[in-house]
Image (cartoon, rainbow, N blue to C red):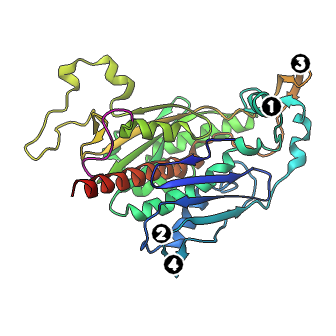
Amino acid sequence: MAGNTFGKLFKLTTFGESHGAAIGGVIDGCPSGIKLDFEAIQNELDRRKPGQSKIVTQRKEPDTVEFYSGIFEGVTTGTPIGFVIHNTNQKSKDYSHIKDVYRPSHADYTYDKKYGVRDYRGGGRSSARETASRVVAGAIAKQFLSAIKINAFTSSVGEIFVEKPYQELDFSKIESNVIRCPDEASANKMIAKVQEIKKQGDTIGGTITCVLQNVAVGLGEPVFDKLHAELGKAMLSINAVKGFEYGSGFCGAKMKGSEHNDLFNEDGSTKTNLSGGVQGGISNGMDIYFRVAFKPVATVIQKQDALNSSGEIVEMQGKGRHDPCVVPRAVPIVEAMAALVLADYTLLRRQESQNWD
């Protein structure tokens, strides 16, 4: 299986399955001399871990990360950083009923046809549990990028949207509620909606908005390695993501050029920021903001028709512990992937500068 590594200079390779002994990763290219705050790293994992509230899966995993290399006396050495997160609360028997059944909208069918074998316990490698490794790497990338502010939050659940622009929101309130929405009125409606959907044995989707502030001018390349393109790839690599838009996004397609253009101020900033902080694929120093759409979780606790390995349509019902809405737990994952992109492009920019010197 290819495609387990992300990044060019700041690289993350992940390994492990949902119901295996452990998951983990290797970070290659992290600069030396970064004094790590291990409590902050664990806090990021705690934001993503299961069982943290009544509106997420009740699988209980401590998600404690153990580092094995690349760090000496709390400081990065510049060598590969190896880490592991042990799985401690697997209930593989919850998946025995789908051993020979392909769940609708899961990776079961495509995995079986591509590889000829699949780990049906929680989806194996296709499980969102793999994203815990990304959060570890993203937490380290955040500490490398200490001057940059990275904030993501739930901006919609179903048809319930935060109507205020992000500039009017207090990001310090993101963690004040279980849905991770900084607008209290919207948060209460979202939580009630998720609880309602959960009682129905169903699931619901939503969106996450991410804002990157204090990003230097000059990150990104103008052709195939555009900064926003890499951010899009990073977000679309997250489980359940169905869409990515930055700046004005699809709304920009409804506007005239005279309305959409970001006019300059004398200091190089712009009066508006419909470009979303990126022009020509390169960061322009303004806030980078984007939105990521997540589909409803595919496992529903309702009876559905499904295909089995014998080519028959059979009736199946989801079992086990699953999120009625994945969005609140995906907030730290979005932040982590954004941090990995910025760390990679920051190192690429440094390399370019050295080549010019």
| 216 and 208: which is toward the camera | 216
Q: Amino acid at mark 1?
A: Asp
Residue placed most toward the observer, 223 or 112: 223
Residue identified by numbered label 3: 311
Eyeballing the image, is 107 above or below 313? below
N-terminal label among 1 and 4: 4
Q: Residues within 10 Å of mark 1 (few under 14, many from 20)?
A: some
First in sequence: mark 3 vs mark 4 = 4
Q: Reading the chain from its start, which is encountered first: label 2 or label 3?
A: 2
Cβ–Cβ under 8 Å for marks 3 and 4: no
In depth, the one of 342 and 304 nearer the eye is 342
The residue that label 1 is drawn on is: 112
Q: Amino acid at mark 3?
A: Gly
Magenta residues (range): 215-224
Residue identifier under label 4: 74
| Percent coordinates x, y for residue 205 in the rendering | 59, 33
